[in-house]
Image (cartoon, helix red, strand yellow):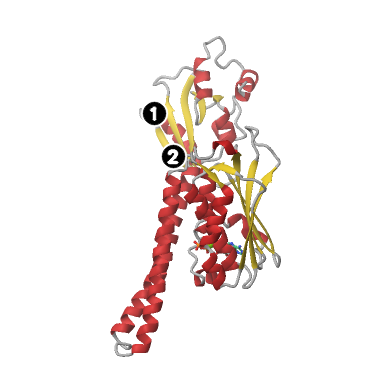
Amino acid sequence: MVAGRDAGESEGAGYGSGEPAVWRAVVDALPDGAIVLDSEGRVMHHNLAARDLFPRLRPGLVLAQVMRHPDLLAAADRAVLAPDPVEVQIVEHMPIERRITARVSRLSEAPVERQPALLVTFRDLSEQDRLAQMRADFVANASHELRTPLASLRGYVETLQGPARNDAVARERFLASMADHAARMTRLIDDLLSLSRIEMRQHLPPRTIVDLDAVAASALQGMEPLATAARVTLKLSPLQGRAFARADRDEIVQVLQNLLQNAIKYGREGGKVEVRLSRETATGLAGQGRIAVAVIDDGPGIPAEHLPRLTERFYRVNPGTSRDKGGTGLGLAIVKHVMTRHRGELRIASQVGEGSRFTIVLDEVAGSGAGD
Ligand SMILES: Nc1ncnc2c1ncn2[C@@H]1O[C@H](COP(=O)(O)OP(=O)(O)OP(=O)(O)O)[C@@H](O)[C@H]1O
Ligand SMILES: [Mg+2]
């Protein structure tokens, strides 16, 4: 039962009594918040969505007792005389900041006493605003990330055209730096394209079945050169028996390589990095087990306050260090998106001074299905 309706029958004595209540059911069924007012501006009926927005809302009250938005109250006055709906924007600050569009429509030209006269509907624009803000931030961040190496490149070009024109030693040095900056920009564009490709396929879960031990081994192999350069020892701890999951092989290799790259880059120079596969005993909805693949380092770790934000695009714990190491800040965002597409999970655990553990978890499928 709609709370408002019950209250209406007792508080707003006599409202709509004896008449068919179809319009009330219509108001209840509306997805947006809706309030029906009578010719005196009293609340005759409202749905639950409206009550969520304005907790004081009760049938029998006048609008001014329910909310203090002068623009909305004025819109209701105007709407009585206006043939077209009147729209106003209202901003709520408590309990959270929200932007809401309110639309007041006249229901009848000559309202009858105690009959519906105005319909006020509310649309919460906060989610839309949040998405727009995210898009704007993303474009701003991406441009900024590209602008930095681009500015360096232009600086080098100018120096090579001017003061260093005949300096062979400087030329070699500058060209090497220019190659680094160009490579960085390429990486950034590749990562951005990767992200948008994965996002586009988010609703299409992978269908192929892969052997996770083999995928982990292949990801590890690809990271050998980087590990050797950082004097890091890589270790694979496979499962007893093989483990299969429904997954996109290339995407899981990319995920593991992003995690391994981080473990090597931000871990301890001369340290150890382990990829450990394990089978989780808990069973999923379909009764199947899950396979966890953890990438574990013995580096400096990550302070707890950063952990919830690590998968945000361009988020870095230490922006300077990460950029120096050639990071674009997109690696973990890609990991998260791939795991979402796989209906899997990413777990991050880290202890300052001890190291970090990034674990991906996938549903296991029976081995006999391999090669599907
Ligand atoms: N194993 C780790 N140990 C310590 N810090 C880490 C570890 N993995 C990630 N981080 C921190 O998380 C941040 C985000 O990682 P992410 O992989 O998203 O970006 P990146 O490594 O900076 O760039 P990219 O992966 O795109 O080259 C890093 O900048 C780093 O500060
Ligand atoms: Mg990374």
Give x and y (percent) for residue 199. Answer: 45, 47
Q: Which residue is mark 2?
A: 88
| Label 1: which secondary element | loop
Residue beneath the point at 29% across and 87% down: 165
Quadrant assignment, res 266:
bottom right
Q: Nearer the viewer, mark 2 or mark 1?
A: 2
Image quadrant of ligand 1?
A: bottom right
Residue beneath the point at 41% across and 19% down: 110
Outermost residue on the top side: it is: 18
Foreground: 155 or 127? 155
Foreground: 177 or 241? 241
Query: Where 212 falls versus 262 (above or below)?
Result: above
Distance from disc 2 to disc 1, alpha carbons, whole Å, reads 16 Å
| Label 2: which secondary element | strand
Q: Which residue is mark 1?
A: 81
Mark 2 touches mark 1? (CB < 8 Å):
no
Give x and y (percent) for residue 366. Answer: 60, 37
Q: Please tell me which of labels 2 and 1 falls first in the chain.
A: 1
